[in-house]
Amino acid sequence: MTQLLELKNIECRYGTLTAVSDLSLHVKQGSLVCLLGPSGCGKTTALRAIAGFEPVVSGEIVLGGKVIARPGYTLAPEQRHLGMVFQDYALFPHMDVNANIAFGLRGMSSAERRQTTARMLKVVGLEGLGSRYAHELSGGQQQRVALARALAPQPALILMDEPFSNLDVDLRERISLEVRDILKSQGATGILVTHDQHEAFALSDQIGVMHEGKILQWDTPYNLYHEPATRFIADFIGQGIFLRGTLVAPDTVLTEIGTFKGNRAYDWPPGAQVDLLMRPDDIVHDDAAPMRAEVIHKAFKGAEIMYTLRLPTGSKILSMFPSHHDHAIGELVGIRIEADHMVAFRC
Amino acid sequence: MSSDFFQVSDLWDPISLTLRLAALTSLGLLILGTPLAWWLARTCSRLKIPIEAIVALPLVLPPTVLGFYLLIAFAPHGLIGAPWLALSGHTLAFSFGGLVIGSMLYSLPFVVQPLQNAFEGVSTNLLDAASTLGAAPLRRFFTVAVPLSTRGFITALTLGFAHTVGEFGVVLMIGGNIPGQTQVLSIAIYDHVESMEYGQAHLLSIGLLLFSFVTLSLVYSLNRRWRLVPGARRG
């Protein structure tokens, strides 16, 4: 696989405000990647720079081996051959679905255009809705029209700016999986920008977590959750708490609930104080276990219940129990540690 | 000839002159006002505010002020009059050509403001979407901005036309009162009243009143109906 898109140390500014700084990334042909981060982290600016709506003040953007942006030069968006799905879908309200999808199909005969439009409608599962207008469609359908319209001209790369944020929460994950299937079926290369990790996990092969204009970690969803590189990522991705401990060997941490031996070694001196990341799935329910903790808070999640527990020392931990283990607040429950990954940050 | 008796041509000349003036003025303003309104709607330039103020000036200035300066500019040695004289061999003041230029300035806000409002209502995201789909600026303008601003165009053209039909002060200052050349409806009415020809004055006045009423009703009803047509919905 070849690199389709390269961002080389780009920087974008709004006046004196630096929105993106020293950002580098590579996107391979056929991969789906995501820029994930809280609002204001610069992810949308980065996407708009790739699309050609924002200039770069340093660095360069290379698409298919050709420089499309560097300081003082920004290739116009209409010449980049990229598809984009906007947060509000940006469907043309004065055109029906067919005309929206056909908008980017220039230089085709009208028969070819009709054929492509019909094929794209089928790809996104909206056959028969070609003569509807945007306001006659549900949010999920509009989203799919936007996707079909962006995919129709077979762009080199498809950019998606928070494309699921206008959908109902319970629809988001399902639609992002569907979109992933559609993009993969078309062999498309895509970049998603979102603040929602569940969307990011559902859609992408690789994720770059952004904070204050920089990418902190570029990794698979699995690694971001289990092997976060920084405290910010550990906090931002998934749930969990930090438990104070002491490093007794490069790969072993002693805490109030036991000794953790992990899969990575730290080169801090023995005796160093560390914060150990405890995910809710690292602590399992076990009535037979000698270790007891008090339930102080519970959140029912359907198949599971997320318990906030207080240890005898007063520290709090989170633990996910299967839903049929229903305990009242104040009750003491048995817990056991079952952690495969040991992630520690030095205090 | 008694004052109660009048010839059809006495009435028709000012009417046809007025209609011609209004049509040419609206057309000219459509051509010049559209790019100006588009620029005003999209620009972040510091010039935006002073230019908006200049466009709005005819709304607040007495027509005599505009007319006075135009008269000076149109004079055979004036800023516009001299080159015009050199090019066409005619003076601009007290001519139909001068009236068209004066009317265009006088009706400028009535065309530019509705267009600017309509253009500002076109979401930037739609234009951005069009550009990612390969549409260059001109195609974005004609396939996205213009169809979504239909109401603005109808309002601008109707108001520009109607307002030119109703002008008086500027015409009086720069056009004078030459039958068949610069004597528009409002001037003709004034003339008839001055000459105590109340019959003619009534006829023209009632005609103008009805015309204005019908035009405005049309604008309002179109604006209302258009909102229900799917194609013109915004957002």
Image: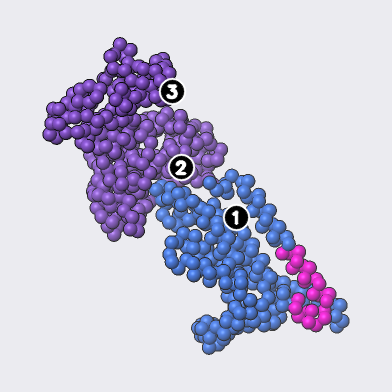
Q: Nearer the viewer, residue A179 or B182?
A: A179
Chain letter for the part of the structure drawn in purple: A
Q: Which residue is mark 3?
A: A300
Q: CA distance from mark 1 to mark 3?
A: 53 Å
Q: Position of residue A310 (x, y in %)?
A: 34, 24
What residue range appears in magenta? B189-212
Quickly name the residue at label 1: B151
Question: As drawn, is A248 to the left or to the right of A70?
Answer: left
Q: Provide the secondary structure element on which disc 1 rests.
A: helix
- Neighbour class for label 3 at 10 Å: few (<14), some, many (≥20)? few
Quadrant in the picture for the C terminus of chain A: top left
Point 64% across, 66% down: residue: B161
The shade of chain B is blue
- What's the amino acid at mark 3? Phe
Determine whether label 3 and label 2 are within 8 Å by CB.
no
Residue B10's place in the image compared with A307, above or below, is below
Residue A303 appears in view? no
What residue would you read off at disc 2? A89
Q: Is residue A276 above or below residue A39?
A: above
For the residues beneath circles 1 and 3, the answer to whether they share a chain is no
- Whether residue A303 sits left or right of residue B95 in the image: it is left
